[in-house]
Image (cartoon, rainbow, N blue to C red):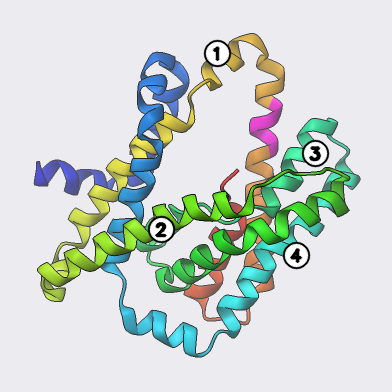
């Protein structure tokens, strides 16, 4: 079991690609995995939080300019930039709307785990992700109305309560694990923890593809166009994020790029 998890940790990219393909090509499996979507996110958060150095988080909070700048970038600047790109490229209306809304959403929670896997600044990613998911209910509705003329009816209190349950539960679990396991033991098990995170990402990748296979059969052209647009938007926002934060240390700039491109929608 431990060897299998270590193998997953060493081959994260391949495993995730397989998970996405399985989710598309095996719709029943994606449907079975769908209820595990939230638990897989919780697992990813717990693994990431267990590995975090609290001193790095404290340093970022004490000097918040970098983290605050990235939060403002992902929640405010990128949707404006994406609106300009959509106006220039003129995709299908619904696709353009989805691209702008995606750019206005917070970074995906699994970005923290990705930062650990590829050696980027996971502390910065954690602060940005946690801040963004609690701020976005206040920024997304006015931005959608301003940029798209779209009225979003979001129950802010209910939304934030669900987020608090996920993030708070993950944080408490991580604190309990860190209290029971020595820091040195956690540091020695980096590859194993990567494997656990990849297992969670594999479930996430399969679950999030629920319905995509059927949609691809019914509307192959639309799904292909959406896939191309999503990949292009992800890559473009990552490049823009890296350029915007080139003034930070390289690991932080690359983390900002990763957060810029990978969103919760």
- Give the mark toward the camera: 4 or 2: 2
Q: Quadrant of the C terminus?
A: top right
Q: What element carries label 4?
A: helix
* Magenta residues, start to end: 225-229
Residue designated by label 2: 167
Q: Which of marks 4 and 1 is nearer the N terminus?
A: 4
Q: Mark 4 points at which residue?
A: 77
* Alpha-carbon span between mark 4 and mark 3: 17 Å
Residue 156 sits above or below residue 19 on the image: below
Say which mark, if any, is on residue 214: 1
* Labels 4 and 2: the sequence-earlier one: 4
Q: Is residue 14 visible?
A: no
Which residue occupies the extreme bottom position in the image?
62
Q: Is mark 1 on a helix, strand or loop?
A: helix
Name the residue beneath numbered marker 3: 96
Q: Earlier in the sequence, mark 3 or mark 2?
A: 3
Which element is circle 2 on? Answer: helix
Q: How far is mark 1 from mark 3, CA to CA? A: 22 Å
Examine the rendering and report whether any part of residue 21 can be seen. Answer: yes
Do the numbered discs 3 and 2 sit on residues whose CB atoms are within 8 Å?
Answer: no
Residue 101 vs 125, above or below: the answer is above
Mark 4: few/some/many CA within 10 Å (<14, 14-19, 20+):
some
- First reached walking from the N terminus: tag 2 or tag 1: 2
Horizontal side of 191 relative to 156 (left or right) equals left
Residue drawn at the location 25% of the way across and 59% of the way down: 173
| Residue 185, horizontal then vertical, whole percent | 11, 69
> Principal SS element in the magenta part?
helix
């Amino acid at each position: 079991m431990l060897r299998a998890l270590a193998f997953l940790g060493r081959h994260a990219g391949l495993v995730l690609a397989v998970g996405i393909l399985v989710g598309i090509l095996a719709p029943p499996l994606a449907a079975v995995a769908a209820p595990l979507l939230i638990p897989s996110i919780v697992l990813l958060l717990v693994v990431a939080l267990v590995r975090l150095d609290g001193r790095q988080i404290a340093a970022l909070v004490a000097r918040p300019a970098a983290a605050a700048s990235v939060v403002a970038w992902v929640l405010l600047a990128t949707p404006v930039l994406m609106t300009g790109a959509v106006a220039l490229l003129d995709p299908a209306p619904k696709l353009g709307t989805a691209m702008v809304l995606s750019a206005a959403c917070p970074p995906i929670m699994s970005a923290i785990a990705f930062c650990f896997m590829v050696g980027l600044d996971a502390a910065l990613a954690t602060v940005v992700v946690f801040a963004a998911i609690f701020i976005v209910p206040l920024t997304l509705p006015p931005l959608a109305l301003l940029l798209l003329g779209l009225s979003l009816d979001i129950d802010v209190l209910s939304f934030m309560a669900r987020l608090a349950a996920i993030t708070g539960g993950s944080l408490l679990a991580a604190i309990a694990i860190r209290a029971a396991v020595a820091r040195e033991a956690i540091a020695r098990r980096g590859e194993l923890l990567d494997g656990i995170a990849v297992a969670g990402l594999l479930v996430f990748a399969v679950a999030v593809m629920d319905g995509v296979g059927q949609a691809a059969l019914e509307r192959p052209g639309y799904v292909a166009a959406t896939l191309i647009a999503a990949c292009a938007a992800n890559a473009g926002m990552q490049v823009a994020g890296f350029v915007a934060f080139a003034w930070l240390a390289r690991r932080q700039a690359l983390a900002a790029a990763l957060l810029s491109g990978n969103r919760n929608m």
